[in-house]
Amino acid sequence: MAKQMHYNEMREVFARFQTAEAEPEGELEHVNVYTLVVAVALSAQATDKGVNKATRELFKIADTPEKMLALGEEGVIEHIKTIGLYRNKAKNVIKLSQKLVDEFGGEVPNSRAALQSLPGVGRKTANVVLNMWWKQPAQAVDTHIFRVGNRSGIAPGKDVDAVERAIEDNVPADFQLHAHHWLILHGRYICVARKPKCGACHIRDLCQFEDKTQ
């Protein structure tokens, strides 16, 4: 595991990310906060591209909890059966929609605890929603961010909770809002798992990864 990067290096890393892409955006398609919650919940163990393909038609006819409930579990399955674990995910989409109607007046709550009370919504999903929709500096750590954080020294940690804390504790406040997206996109397209594209990396000189590629 790399050592925690020094503050001055952290500032330089995120300044470069900001210069390269000042307003990074998530790649999950959605039309409102409800469809964002559903899309993020569906994205567990699936690609954003695969989720988008499945939800484009679904969200045209079911963009509220009430409409999703009217569609029913089998109707949801028909739209998302190309996604892994689709039966369980469809069940959770219906359950979370019912809970939103019953307990939150059909509105998506904006506290982490309330979001995590929804079926199929864990801390990572809640953090993505808080960050993308309500512009909170919440850090959702997935496999990409875990890899980048540990390889580079930006946010080393033995588990996702430790990496999340390292980001919150060490990334300068003025970069916190977009830190999640900069790191996930860097891990998805540059600092990939098997053969990282170190030659195309604009933080190569600051990264602590010892087995850099050309």
Image (spheres, rainbow, N blue to C red):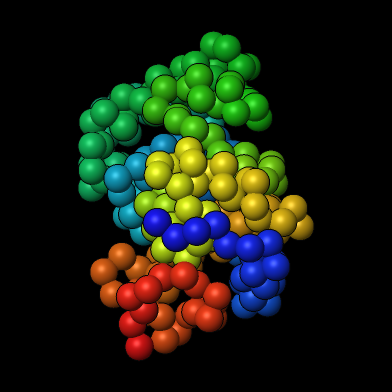
Which residue occupies 48% across, 22% down? 118
Horizontal and vertical percent position of residue 143: 37, 52
The quadrant holding residue 148 is: bottom left
Horizontal and vertical percent position of residue 124: 48, 38
Horizontal and vertical percent position of residue 146: 42, 52
Vertical relation: 132 (above or below) 172: above
Q: Is residue 3 left or right of residue 191?
A: right
The quadrant holding residue 105 is: top right
Which residue occupies 33% across, 54% down? 47
Which residue occupies 45% across, 47% down? 157
Q: Is residue 36 left or right of residue 130?
A: left
Q: Is residue 146 left or right of residue 202?
A: left
Horizontal and vertical percent position of residue 69: 42, 23
Q: Quadrant of the N terminus?
A: bottom left
Which residue occupies 55% across, 26% down? 115
Q: Is residue 35 visible?
A: no
Which residue is the extreme one toward the front? 3
* 205 vs 50, nearest the viewer: 205
